[in-house]
Amino acid sequence: MKCDLCSSKIQETFLNKMLGTQIKVSGKKKLVCFECQKKFPTKEALVKQLS
Ligand SMILES: [Zn+2]
């Protein structure tokens, strides 16, 4: 899985839980890594970056 913002690989933990977050932007699921989450801490800012 890759981050939709910076295209870096998103790692999974041993429980297959991703170290990132999924958000919906205009009906599409987007993946954002932990680093990008730190850069854009609000959902509004992330959606703005992804749309
Ligand atoms: Zn990223």
Image: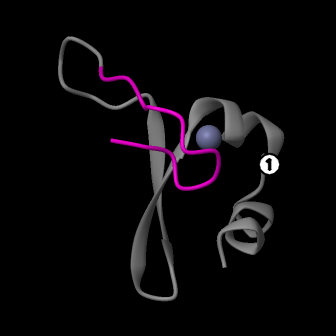
In the displayed structure, 49 sits above or below 21; it is below
Estimate the x, y position of residue 2 in percent, counting from the top left: 42, 43
Q: Residue at x 68, y 71 (%)?
A: 47
Q: Residue at x 68, y 41 (%)?
A: 37
Asked whether residue 7 is drawn in magenta, I would say yes
Q: Ligand 1 is found in which quarter of the picture? A: top right
User: Does residue 7 appear to the left or right of 49 in the view shown?
Assistant: left
Asked whether residue 11 is drawn in magenta, I would say yes
User: Does residue 48 appear to the left or right of 18 in the view shown?
Assistant: right
Q: Quadrant of residue 16?
A: top left
Q: Quadrant of residue 44?
A: bottom right
Q: Residue furthest bottom?
A: 26
Q: Quadrant of residue 29?
A: bottom left
Q: Residue at x 77, y 73 (%)?
A: 48
Q: Quadrant of the N terminus?
A: top left
Q: Residue at x 29, y 16 (%)?
A: 13
In the displayed structure, 38 sits above or below 32; it is above
Q: Quadrant of the C terminus?
A: bottom right
Q: Residue furthest left?
A: 15
What amino acid type should be assigned to the residue bearing mark 1? Phe
Of helix, strand and loop, which one carries label 1?
Answer: loop
* Part of the protein shown in magenta: 1-12
In the displayed structure, 42 sits above or below 49; it is above
Note whether ligand 1 is within 8 Å of mark 1.
no
In the displayed structure, 5 sits above or below 48; it is above
Q: Find disc 1 in the rendering and name its residue.
A: 40
Q: Main secondary structure of the magenta part?
A: loop
Estimate the x, y position of residue 18 in percent, counting from the top left: 34, 32
Estimate the x, y position of residue 27 in percent, counting from the top left: 41, 87
Q: Residue furthest front?
A: 7
